[in-house]
Image (cartoon, rainbow, N blue to C red):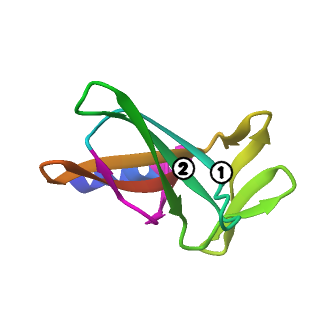
């Protein structure tokens, strides 16, 4: 009976297309001093190299009461390519559209979410792991 229920659940998930794939990003720099107050993520172009990737913008709480900002850049293993007003990557022989160009920058596609996790290795440093989930 348990196997029968498991098969039903698996078939229901396949029928409703609830599967997702995860693409891990590679960090160019991954530690931030102090504690983050606010974090925003977006796609964009690194001005120094012209490479497209993921930006993590962090507002930090400084020790003296002032806020400061820091930005981390992450790239995908297969790279991010631009075609007209679209950013895309090739993953497992599939073209995945990541973002569309808007007036003020790049807006992630409807099926794409930029995710992150913060871990604290030392008392004062945070390490960010960033990845993309595609539904």
For the residues bearing labels 1 and 2, Cβ distance under 8 angstroms = yes
**Going 80% across and 33% down the picture, which residue do you hit?**
103
Q: Nearer the viewer, residue 5 or 30?
A: 30
Above or below 86: residue 49: below
Q: Earlier in the sequence, mark 1 or mark 2?
A: 1
* Residue 33 visible in the picture: yes
The percent position of residue 41, horizontal first and vertical second, equals 52, 42
Q: Residue furthest right?
A: 84
44 relative to 10 in the view: left or right: right
Residue 106 is drawn in which quadrant? top right
Question: Which element type, helix, strand or loop, lies under badge 1?
Answer: strand
Residue 64 is drawn in which quadrant? top left
> Magenta region: which residues?
13-33
Taking the magenta stretch, the answer to whether it contains residue 40 is no
What crowding class fits label 1: few (fewer than 14 Cα within 10 Å), some (14-19), or many (20 or more)? many
Above or below 105: residue 132: below
Q: Nearer the viewer, residue 120 or 19?
A: 120
* Residue 5 visible in the picture: no
Q: Nearer the viewer, residue 31 or 116?
A: 31
107 relative to 124 in the view: left or right: right
Taking the magenta stretch, the answer to whether it contains residue 25 is yes
Q: CA distance from mark 1 to mark 2?
A: 7 Å
Question: Which element type, helix, strand or loop, lies under badge 2?
Answer: strand
The percent position of residue 52, horizontal first and vertical second, equals 66, 60
**Going 54% across and 50% down the picture, which residue do you hit?**
55
Please name the residue that numbered disc 1 is placed on: 44
Please name the residue that numbered disc 2 is placed on: 55
What crowding class fits label 2: few (fewer than 14 Cα within 10 Å), some (14-19), or many (20 or more)? many
67 relative to 132 in the view: left or right: left
Q: Residue furthest top?
A: 65
**Going 46% across and 66% down the picture, which residue do you hit?**
28
């Amino acid at each position: 009976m348990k196997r029968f229920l498991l098969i039903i659940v698996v078939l229901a998930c396949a029928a409703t297309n609830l599967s997702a794939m995860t693409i891990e990003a590679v960090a160019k720099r991954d530690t931030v001093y102090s504690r983050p107050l606010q974090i925003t993520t977006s796609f964009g172009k690194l001005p120094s190299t012209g490479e497209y990737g993921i930006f993590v913008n962090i507002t930090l709480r400084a020790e003296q009461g002032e806020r400061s900002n820091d930005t981390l850049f992450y790239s995908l293993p297969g790279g991010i390519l631009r075609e007209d007003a679209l950013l895309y990557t090739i993953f497992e022989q599939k073209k995945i559209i990541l973002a569309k160009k808007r007036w003020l920058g790049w807006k992630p596609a409807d099926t794409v979410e930029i995710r992150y996790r913060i871990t604290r290795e030392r008392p004062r440093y945070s390490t960010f792991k960033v990845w993309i989930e595609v539904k």
